[in-house]
Amino acid sequence: MSAAVALGAALVTGPIAADEVAVAPATIRKWVQLGHLAPAGHRGRAQLFRLEDVFAAERATRRRPRS
């Protein structure tokens, strides 16, 4: 279990979100750019994400065949 889940945090930063789904932080930024994931808030300049949204984006992008 991650620290974010253990603490009951509702929103996580991009690097933590990336860690949760085992992708690079750049992948999270790309999902946002492509519209697969939307930030749920901001802390300063950092985008914050709901983990459930991150998991949904990960499932959606893994399901598609690569072209």
Image: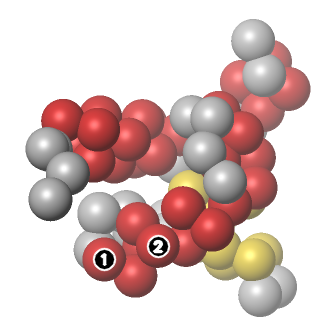
Residue at 63% over, 68% down? 26
Residue 27 x, y percent position in the rendering: 54, 61
Q: Is residue 9 visible?
A: yes
Q: What label sits on residue 34 in the rendered view?
A: 1
Q: Secondary structure at mark 2?
A: helix
Residue 47 x, y percent position in the rendering: 65, 73
- Of residue 43 and residue 2, the one placed in the foreground of this image is 2
Give the residue type that dot 2 points to: Lys
Kindly indicate the quadrant of the structure image that contains residue 49. Answer: bottom right
Residue 9 drawn above or below residue 67: above
Q: What label sits on residue 30 in the rendered view?
A: 2
Residue 63 x, y percent position in the rendering: 18, 35
Residue at 29% over, 63% down? 36
Question: Seen in the image, is 31 located left or right of residue 67?
Answer: right
Residue 58 drawn above or below residue 6: below
Give the residue type that dot 1 points to: Leu
Contact between marks 1 and 2 (CB within 8 A): the answer is: yes
